[in-house]
Image (spheres, rainbow, N blue to C red):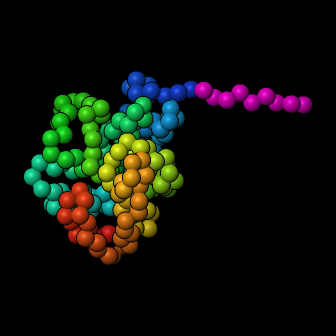
Amino acid sequence: MTVDLIPFKRVWTEADLAELPGDGSRYEIIDGRLYVVPPAGELHNSRGVSLISQLAAAAPPGWRVLYEIGLAIGDDRFVPDLVVLPPGTPVAAADFNDVSVVSPALVVEIASRSTQTTDAGDKMIAYARGGIPAYWRVTRDGTIHIHQLMEPGVYTLVARVVLGDTHDVLWPFKLTLAAR
C-alpha cells in the first residue's frame, strides 16, 4: 500500500497573529511558519534583566533598550528578547507596536529549551539578512555569543563571553559586558 503525502501549505501572515489567544506565549512567523514560544522561566528572565540593565546603564543619550517588542523583517515577524534602537528610531504609539518602523542596532536572544535551535539557526539567518548590525545569543549555560555583520547577510562571531567573565564591547556603544 502506498501513502501519498500532501505537503501542508499554510503560510502564516501578520494578520493571522491577531486571531491567536493572548495566553502569555510569544507568537513569531519565520518563513511563513508559526512558532509558539511559551512564557520564559526565572533563569531566562534573570539573564534578560542583567543584560537590559547593563545595556541601559551604558547607552548614550537617545539610544533605547527594549524588552520583547515586535520586529518585522520582510514577511517574518519576531519578538526578540531584547533590542537596542539607535537615536532617531521612531517611537510607536503606546497602544500599537508598529514593527515596520523598528530597525535595531542590536538584537539579543536568550535561549531556552524551546528556542535554542531557532536562535542559533533561523533567527540568526533572518536577522543577518535583515541587516541588523549585531546579534547577541545567550546560550543555556550563560555564554554570550557576540556576532557582528561583517559582510552583508552574514554574521561573524567576534567574541564569546562565558559565565562569570567580562568583555569590552564597542558596538552598539562602549560597554564592559558581564555574563551573569
Q: Looking at the image, which residue is at 49% across and 46% down?
A: 122
Q: Is residue 96 left or right of residue 124?
A: left
Residue 112 horizontal/vertical position (percent): 45, 56
Residue 5 is left or right of residue 22, and the answer is: right
Residue 136: name its quadrant: bottom left
Extreme residue in the right direction = 1
Residue closer to the observer: 60 or 55: 60
Residue 161 screen position, x and y as percent: 36, 70
Q: Nearer the viewer, residue 107 or 95?
A: 107
Q: Residue at x 29, y 74 (%)?
A: 166
Name the main secondary structure of what is drawn in magenta.
loop
Look at the image and tell me in which quarter the C terminus lies.
bottom left
Foreground pick, 148 / 146 = 148
Q: Is residue 2 magenta?
A: yes
Quarter of the N terminus within the rendering: top right
Residue 46 image point, x, y percent: 31, 61
Residue at figure coordinates x 27%, y 45% from the top left: 104
Residue depicted at 21% across the width and 30% down the height: 95
Q: Residue furthest bottom?
A: 165
Image quadrant where residue 177 sits: bottom left
Figure check: 78 above or below 57: above
Say if 87 sits above or below 90 in the image. Answer: below
Q: Is residue 66 visible?
A: no
- Quarter-of-image position of residue 96: top left
Q: Which residues are magenta?
A: 1-9
